[in-house]
Amino acid sequence: MNRQSSFDAAFARLEAAVTSGRVPGGVLGLVSQDGSRITRAVGHAQLEPDPRPMTEDTWFDLASVSKVVFTTERILAHARNGRIDLDAPLVALIPDLRQYHADTAWERQLTVRQCLGHQTGLPPVFPIYTYGRDPDQLRAFVLQHEWPRGPAAYSCINFILLGIGLERLEGCRIRDMEPGFGFAFSSHVNITAASEHCHWRGRVMVGEVHDENCFALQGAGNAGLFGNVSSVLDYAYQLLEMDGAGNSHTRLLRTEIGPTRGHGWELPHPDWSGSRYCSDQTIGHTGFTGTGLWVDFAAGHAWTLLTNRVHPSRFTPSDILQLRQAVAAALYGKD
């Protein structure tokens, strides 16, 4: 099966998900190491209150894909420049972390690398936004809260802490940093896919970050970027080019920190979103809103599947994992 045929088969999986009502719409994109790419859109960027068609120019709330295309990249850039020691405790960046329990707080021993690889034991989820609406107060809460310690798990708190560390290092808020994508598209609602009708905020989110904690913090390291298929594939192509030139950065991204995690990125493991057909030199990351990016360095290609699967509600069954796996399998010529 050639590349176009594989793409057509993968896109058919997305079309079927849209036709069945599992997702309102989506865009699929594939880029190869030679720079060639294929993109295609289907369905609706918005259903409520007024329908809008999905196009290849539609921008999406990338959600947790922000963790790798922005926060991880920025942390590792500072590490290359000697401004961050990945194995140093977070307190090297955030000296006031649990400052009132400096001798006993376990959180003060956490390292930057542990946060990148989700090996800290911090809780998987926590509703920080329910503790207030002032972003400075919420940052203070994150830093002084006594967090329960559990087994290593994927946790947005890891990247919220990394984001605060970046803010301290660079002397500005996350949203004032140059991301290479975009942090808000509320002034461009006509080109942005709608996400959820948020009961907390009382409206359909279009061009505003879906993640409640990131919204309340007015920018955080765990979410917040917007991108379209072109900008996401541009980033993926840069990684493919680096790897082709033998750049150590891409090797670091896929260097294992935990059983399923590299530096920021997820690594192939049974039943993961990138399917069982990718090479062991693949990295990937998904976003809660229905987005995802995977880069297979051995195969020399990358793909992104961007959907608005939480529109109008996260509680509508979307079978998003199965869709991601089916699309990936088809791209490799498998059913």
Image: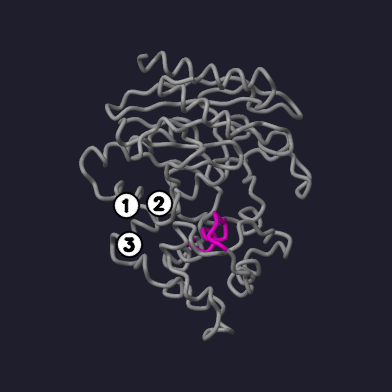
Closer mark to the observer between disc 1 and disc 3? 1
Q: Are marks 2 and 1 in contact (CB under 8 Å)?
A: yes
Callout 3: SS: helix
- What residue appears at the point 48 percent right and 40 percent down from the top-left corner? 270
Q: Position of residue 93 (x, y in %)?
A: 44, 71
Furthest residue to the left?
Answer: 245
Callout 1: SS: helix
Q: Is residue 146 above or below residue 104?
A: above
* Alpha carbon distance from label 2 to label 1: 8 Å
Q: Earlier in the sequence, mark 3 or mark 2?
A: 3
> Which residue carries the number 2 mark?
262
Label 3 CA crowd tier, 10 Å (few <14, some 14–19, many 20+): few
Dot 2 amino acid type: Gly
* Alpha carbon distance from label 3 to label 2: 16 Å
Label 2 CA crowd tier, 10 Å (few <14, some 14–19, many 20+): many
Q: Position of residue 125 (x, y in %)?
A: 64, 56
Q: Name the side, left or right, on which 281 lies relative to 29.
A: left
Dot 1 amino acid type: Leu
Q: Is residue 159 above or below residue 93?
A: above
Q: Which residues are magenta?
A: 151-162
Residues 290 and 255: in front is: 255
Is 158 inside the magenta-drawn segment? yes
> Which residue carries the number 3 mark?
79
Is 277 inside the magenta-drawn segment? no
- What residue appears at the point 53 percent right and 60 percent down from the top-left corner? 152
Callout 2: SS: loop
Closer mark to the observer between disc 3 and disc 2? 2
> Which residue carries the number 1 mark?
252
* Alpha carbon distance from label 1 to label 3: 12 Å
Q: Position of residue 77 (x, y in %)?
A: 33, 56
Quadrant of residue 180 within the rendered picture: top left
